[in-house]
Structures are given as C-alpha cells and as structure tokens.
Image: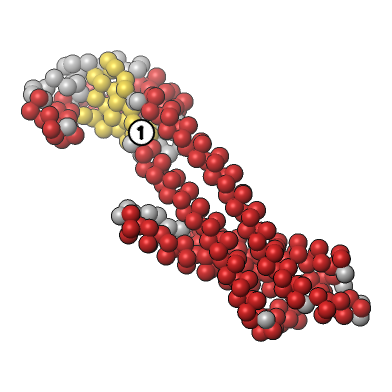
Amino acid sequence: MLALRTALTSFHRAPLLSVLSIITIAFSLFAFGLFGLVALNIRDALERVEERVEIRAFAIDGTPLETMVVAADQVSKFPEVAKVDVVSQAQALERARKELGEFKDVFEGEFLPASLDVKLNVGFRDPISVRKVADRLRTIEFVEDIRFGEEWITQLNKLRNIAGVAGAALGLAFAAVAVIIIGTTIRMAVLARSREISIMRLVGATDGFIGRPFLIEGSIKGVLGGILALVLTYLAMRVLGRYLNFQTSFFDMRLAFLGILFGAVMGLLGSAVSVGRHLRNV
C-alpha cells in the first residue's frame, strides 16, 4: 500500500515528466498496435479466401440425383467435411450463367456435368488434407473428375505460413523496441529521484523497498499508455478506412484487454531493467 501511494505521489511531483512518459509509451505501443491491426486484417483476409476452398467432384453423365444424394450424405460424415452440396446439371448451368454474366448466351442446354461440391472444415484446408479428401472422393463409382485448384491452395498455404512467420518476427521486434523506449522513459523518472534513492540506501532501505514504487509506477504508466495507444489505433483505423474506402476489422474485447495488459507488462519490465541498473550503480 505504501509502495502504491509512493508511486501515485510521483505523478504529482513531476506531472510533466509523467505525461511525457505516458505519451512516449503510448506512441511506442501505438506502432506495435498498428502492426497488430495490419496482421489481424491480413489474417482475416486469408481466412475469407480460405473459406472458398472446396472440392468439386464431377459426376458421369446420366448419374441419377438420388445416387448423388446418398453419396453426399456419406461424404458429409467425413471429419474434414463441413458441407456437401449436390449440384444438378440445370443448377450448374444456372451458376455458370450467373458467374459469367457476359457470356451467359453461350451456355445453352445441359452440357455441364452435375457435381458434388464439398466444403471443408477449418483446419482441413491445407494442401495435404484437401488432397486426402479428393483421393477418397475418387473412389466413388460415379465420379468422373475431381477439381480443387491444387496449385492455388498450395500458394495460399505458403502465403499464410509466410505471413505467420513474418508477423511473429516483426511482432517480437516491435515488442523489443517498445521495452527499450519504455525503459528509457522510466529511467528518466529514476534519475530525477536519484538523490532520494541514495538517501534511502543510506538509511538501510532494501532494493525491493526502493524499487517497488517504480515498478508500480511503470505498470500504471504502461496501462495508461496502452489505453491511449488503443484509442489512437482505433482513430487511425477509422481515418484510413474512410480515406481508402475499405472495411477493416478492429481488436475484439479480449485482444484489447491483452493489449492494455501488454502495456502494463512492458512498463513493469522497463521499470525493472532501469531500476535494477540504477541500483547497481548507487
């Protein structure tokens, strides 16, 4: 309780330094938040593209729809499968006319084959899983051909992996920069009270007693900086979305809370490093 009161008192002693520290922390976390927002929207975009991954099993001409419905029911029980649609020749023709409106007059008659359109569950849209399901579909008697855009799915999987690795590496780099900046701002507060720390050392105060208020102060500044960074990130998202005219996703409540908690942890770590270094030199 004494440490908390001491930490809060330091805000009143040097309000300008405290405000500058919070703003500095906020902008360092703001840069990290912008990167996180970009990474979140890239992930969402890849997930939306992945939702289009499907396997189309074309039936031999003349296959009864009843036979295809029975097969679809069996395929829908595969653990990898989310949904199976039976597409008749008439429906295939209508879909082609809708998707290729400019050439709708070219499509006449029921020359397009009926098919089973298989959509996959999340976690089974990678090339290996898709290929396994396709191989099982080939064993169905009436299936004549299988199409699932293997090359496209492979490239999509590579892009997702690259985005994940690059995101993790850049995220760690931004986090390290944030810790350094926060540590520097806290060190300014420590140096401003260096005489007080020296006196406390002379009267026998332990390192834990001296450092605890600074750790609490750093955590509070980290929380306030995290909240300010979250507000700035939201405003930046709204401005960019309005200027570039596209819809973006923002952090949900869980991620927003984790962002503020991250600010508190960064403030705590920065304080611990700065205070520890100063106490070793006193």
Q: Is residue 208 above or below residue 262?
A: below
Residue at image mark 1? 53
Q: Residue at x 60, y 76 (%)?
A: 19
Relative vertical location of residue 98 with respect to residue 229 in this rendering, above or below: above
Residue 60: in sight, yes or no? Answer: yes
Residue in the foreground of this view, choosing between 236 and 95? 236
- Residue displayed at 57% across by 70% down: 23
Label 1 neighbourhood size at 10 Å, few (<14), some (14-19), many (20+)? many
How many marks the image carries: the answer is 1
User: Image quarter for residue 32?
Assistant: bottom right
Q: Quick check: can you spot residue 73? A: no
* Quadrant in the picture for residue 75: top left
- Horizontally, residue 58 falls left or right of residue 262, namely left
From the top left corner, tell me how far across and down residue 79 is, in percent. 43, 33
User: Disc 1 residue type?
Assistant: Val
* Left or right: 101 in relation to 60: left
Give the SS element for disc 1: loop
20 over 41 or under it: above or below: below
Is residue 279 rendered to the left or right of residue 88?
right
Q: Whole-percent x and y of residue 71? A: 29, 25
- Which x, y percent locates residue 94? 14, 32
Pick the quarter of the image with the C terminus. Answer: bottom right
Residue appearing at x 35%, y 16% in the figure = 139
Residue 87 lies, in percent from the top left, at 21, 29
Q: Nearer the viewer, residue 212 or 170?
A: 170
Q: Compare residues 189 and 266 and report the one nearer the observer.
A: 189
Quarter holding the N terminus is bottom right
Tell me which colouring the rendered structure shows.
Answer: secondary structure
Answer left or right for 100 relative to 260: left
Question: What residue lies at 39% left-to-right and 24% top-to-bottom?
Answer: 151
Residue 133 to residue 263: above or below = above
